[in-house]
Image (spheres, grey):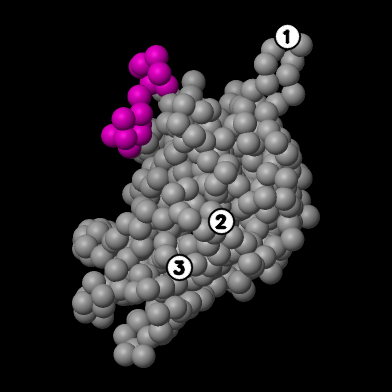
Amino acid sequence: MINKTVDCKKTMARSLQNHLDKTLMSLGITSDNTDLPSIIVAYSGGLDSTVLLHLLAQGKFKVQLTAIHINHGLMPDAEKWARFCQQTCQNLQIPIHIERVVINKQHPQGPEAAAREARYDALLKHAKAETVFLTAHHQDDQAETMLLQLFRGAGPAGLAAMPAVSAFANARLVRPLLDITRQEIQDYATREKLHWIEDQSNQDKSYSRNYLRHEVMPVIRKNWPGINQQLVRGASHQAEATELLKKLAAQDLLDCRVIIKESLNDNLLDLEKVLRLDTLNLKNMLRYYINSRDIPVPGNKQLNHIVNQLSRPSLSGQQQISWHGGELRIYRRLLSVGRPLQVIDPKTRFSWDLWSSPDEGNSRELVNQLILPGSGLALSASKGFGTGLSVARLQQGPVTVRFRQGGESCLLPGRGHHHKLKKLFQEAGIPPWERSQLPLIYVGEELAAVADKWVCTPFDARKNEAGINIRINPAPE
């Protein structure tokens, strides 16, 4: 009987190992080629991630393996845990990075959300093309996540819980144990005589997930023993529904989109076409549109308010609707969304030496980028011929970058007199909120160019004359 029990446990261990290997290989991750992707395990030192790390260390992917431990610094034993993780990885001969993070204790969604964001930000520092991040979320986690989202009133996207594979910057985030139960993980750890960290905060029932795990799920399982599988199946149905809703929203968004060459915003929507959508399609499209811009999606109450505002017959030609982390803007019957704009002091000035100091024996080279701190913008410069700013004129005085204070004017090539910038902005249909964001390029005390929109005479490069073309871009993060 004892031998049969041992054989059964060995079979279960091999089953877990095979499951993990097959999951990774199904993603195109192999260990038998010369161009191996990096595999990085998010290693907390707890039971689940310890089992995942141990499985990988025994398998065919060890050569590609690295661990990352995130030290939140919130618990008295945080440094002790970090040392434990280092020692475990040393024993398994796996490289490890220790990342220490600071938690935003004023996070609007609470400490759990703050810790999660901090973990993901720390992981992002290691995200490279083809990198695969692995987390040890399992079937019980998936079931709990689905229920928590249901209690929060989430829609299909939230009820879909955690995807097995998702994009993560230019890498991939993979949860290869979502089909494995907590009990199977515990059994593996017991058989292999593994050691792990017992985080006492996991017993703190003031956290929603812990309360659900320790108080709610045991009661549910008395009547529905297979509740994990049922909830996971429900999450899968919601994931399929979410994909269909995304496809519908993407098509509606494409039908509503319009391109205005002069605008800084390349994601403008035709308000008339937007308002032809029925309410359900409109809300679905707005959620998709806002999310695609990497902006926090407003809650259902706020979204209903936005839809009601858009539908008002008295909707003005210029309007802004704000929520936490985002703004919807309307100008001349065009709609766009974005993050709240940074307030720029109009007295701000930046010196821009367009040419580097020459090395001994070398000519001066064009400095092709200027970061504008506090604005979220950067200017880039490239050489031209017969276009852009005249190189000869640029050398007549110091080049500075400023912002609009009011009253500025520009003589455009081919026109007989100067025009106020306000007039030019109106002609080009540039929304008022973008106007204060546009950098102005001065040579000495004369306005030479308005960002990458217009070059003012006499600073425009003539035919067969060397020029500098300016582009405005988001500042690199």
Of 403 and 466, nearer the camera is 466
Kindly identify the amino acid type of the residue bearing the numbered disc 3: Gln
Quadrant assignment, res 280: bottom left
> What's the residue at 62%, 31% (across, down)?
392
Quarter of the image where the N terminus is located: top left
Residue at disc 1, secondary structure: loop
Q: Main secondary structure of the magenta part?
A: loop
**In the shown orientation, is residue 290 left or right of residue 230?**
right
Residues at marks 3 and 2, CA–CA distance in whole angstroms: 14 Å
Q: Magenta segment, which residues? A: 21-36
Q: Which residue is mark 1?
A: 361
**Chain-order first, disc 3 or disc 1:** 1
Of 235 and 138, nearer the camera is 235
Residue 343 x/y as whole percent: 65, 65
Residue 342 x/y as whole percent: 62, 63
Q: Which of labels 3 and 1 is toward the front?
A: 3
Residue at disc 2, secondary structure: strand
Q: Which residue is mark 2?
A: 410
Kindly identify the amino acid type of the residue bearing the numbered disc 2: Cys
> What's the residue at 21%, 77% (across, down)?
276
Q: Is residue 163 visible?
A: yes
**Residue count near mark 2 (Cα–Cα under 10 Å), binned few <14, some 14–19, many ≥20:** many
Mark linked to residue 148: none
Quadrant assignment, res 357: top right
Q: Which of labels 1 and 2 is toward the front?
A: 2
Quarter of the image where the C terminus is located: top right
Residue 34 x/y as whole percent: 39, 14
Q: Which residue is mark 3?
A: 426
Mark count? 3
